[in-house]
Image: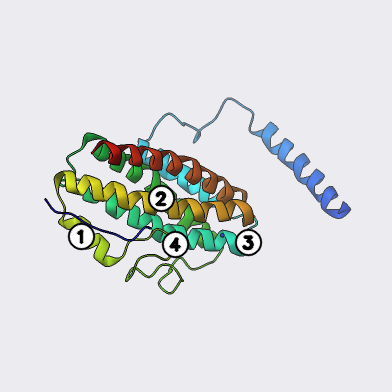
Amino acid sequence: MTSFTRAPRRKSARRAAAVGAVAVGALLLAACGGDDMSGMDHGSGSDSESASASASASAEAGSASFSDADVTFAQMMIPHHEQALEMARLADGRASDAEVKDLAGKIEKAQDPEIKTMKGWLESWKQPTATESMPGMDHGGHGGGDGMMSDADMEELKAMKGTEFDKMFADMMIDHHNGAITMAKDEQKNGKNADAVKMAGDIVKGQSAEVTQLRSILDRL
């Protein structure tokens, strides 16, 4: 049996303008209040189109005020999520435990749309999405505190199968999730953009629950 060892693992004029905008908005709504609602059929379209529209709407909402902390959060979390997806996809054909397979699918389903949304924010903020030179994102070594796996870690995981894969996947994903939780808590404290702060809260809640589940899996295997 293959074994592995690993190190433990961001007015008044305005008021008048606002009143005017509200009045104009009310007139427009009245003009559109007829029975002819062409172009407003929400009952058609596939689930993927709905998900894409939702991600697009979230990205547009994220174009409001933002801070350096919001930018850093998105720039750092995108590659972090991308590596989690890479790890989750390795479960196909390698994992033997049903709970590990199910959790890998949930991770992929949750984090892929978040990546699209964060990239949309950065584009609307006119900020780069590339993070090659950002500190803490060097995959050549592990232990930077962000939970990112090194290239060697990923190659070792790829080589595993069955129960050994399940154990290493759970162990690595616990470290990975804990890194994301730390980054998300920083965003909750320092972020300015409401949508980014909300996503950070979702990450803390969702991934904390998954860490508990992963620990339970390790205890069982």
Where does label 2 land, which residue? 177
Q: How many labels does the image show?
A: 4
Crowd rating for badge 3 (residues with CA inside 10 Å; few <14, some 14–19, many 20+): some
How far separated are the C-alphas under marks 3 and 4? 23 Å
Task: Give the residue number, with chain letter if any, for mark 3.
Answer: 67
Report the Cα–Cα distance between label 4 and label 1. Answer: 20 Å
**Mark 3–mark 2 CB contact (< 8 Å):** no
Q: How many residues crowd around disc 1 within 10 Å: few (fewer than 14), some, or many (20 or more)? A: few
Instruction: In the rendered view, tell whether residue 106 sits above or below residue 122.
Output: above
Please report the residue visible at 63 percent of the width from the left and 33 percent of the height from the top: 32
Q: Where is residue 198 in the image (x, y as percent from the top left)?
A: 56, 45
Q: Quadrant of residue 66?
A: bottom right
Give percent across and percent down for residue 124.
54, 60
Mark 3: which secondary structure? Answer: loop
Task: Look at mark 1 in the image and give the residue it sits on.
Answer: 156
Tell me residue 195's x, y (percent).
Answer: 57, 48
Q: Which residue lies furthest to the left in this view?
A: 1
- For marks 2 and 4, give the CA distance: 11 Å
Quadrant in the rendering for residue 191: bottom right
> Which label sits on residue 145?
4
Q: Residues within 10 Å of mark 2 (few under 14, many from 20)?
A: many
Front of the two marks 1 and 3 = 1
User: What amino acid is labelled 4 in the image?
Assistant: Gly
